[in-house]
Image: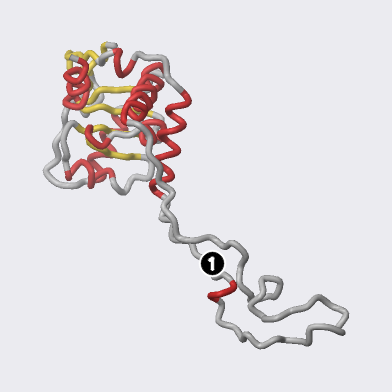
Amino acid sequence: MVLPVINKEGTDTGRTVTLPDEFFGIEPNDHVVYLAVKQHLANKRQGTHKAKERAEVARSTRKIKKQKGTGGARAGSTKSPVFVGGGRVFGPRPRDYGFKINKQVKRLARMSALSAKAKDSAVKVLEDISMDAPKTKNYTSVLNNLSLSNVKTLFVLGTANDNVYLSARNLPKSNVVTFDSLNTYDILHANALILSESAAKRFAQMAE
């Protein structure tokens, strides 16, 4: 897959980059994509939910009425779950929702997500840009020049660039990640994938 390299003004630089079919030309595997997204979302859960059960509620343990003769069910304590303010039965406990999937499965999921974007013609290659200081206005102008101002975008950098990251941080529809931190969820969550020229070349190097 050969794509032209675009500059930050939105015009063709005359250079091209070949994106390997190993990453951008396979038939997407929906099931492994599902597993990767499920794991990503599960790992983001805090798992700090907690409800008090009968033994943890601070209430009196006095027997509230006699055992027999009332015409109602027997009751030994206001801590019982049947009373308002009583403990909860089998309430949630702090837990870790994360689970493991194999490396090859995660890799196939990323390749499937990239191939899906390529199939939808939602991949652009932008020449490496540098910013002297974090300026959201400058990053917004780049998106406007690419006709992606109102689109959810994922910009993949070859290496970390704090100024570019900070410039996009306030934009709700823009996300900036490095090549090494690229994941399936971020790819699928974006409507358009922007690869920096250095990131695109790293894909080519990995395929060699």
Q: How is the image coloured?
A: secondary structure
Residue 47 position within the rendered picture, expressed as x and y whole percent measured from the top left: 44, 56
Type of residue at label 1? Ala
Residue in the foreground of this view, choosing between 164 and 118? 118
Please, which residue is most extreme toward the left here?
132
Residue pictured at 38% horizontal, 39% vertical: 100
**Image side of residue 78 versus residue 66, left or right:** left
In this picture, is 114 found above or below 143?
A: above
Closest to the observer: 53 or 26?
53
Of all residues, the one furthest to the front in this rendering is: 68
- Residue 32 pos. (x, y %): 43, 27
Indicate the quadrant where residue 130 lies.
top left
Instruction: Look at the numbered disc 1 and give the secondary structure of its residue.
Output: loop
Question: Total of numbered circles in the picture?
Answer: 1
Identify the residue at image location x=40%, y=42%. Answer: 99
**Residue 97 against residue 122 in the figure, above or below:** below
Which image quadrant for residue 22? top left
Q: Which residue is denoted by mark 1 in the rendering?
A: 51
Residue drawn at x 71%, y 71% is 82
Instruction: Give above or below for 204 relative to 70.
Output: above
Foreground pick, 39 / 169: 39
Q: Quadrant of the C terminus?
A: top left
* Image quadrant in which the N terminus is located: top left
- Where residue 167 sits in the image (x, y, percent)? 24, 45
In screen coordinates, is 82 left or right of 45?
right
Spot occupied by residue 136 in the image (x, y as percentages of width and height) = 25, 45
Label 1: few (<14), some (14–19) or many (≥20) C-alpha neighbours in 10 Å: some
User: Hey, which quadrant is residue 64 in on the image?
Assistant: bottom right
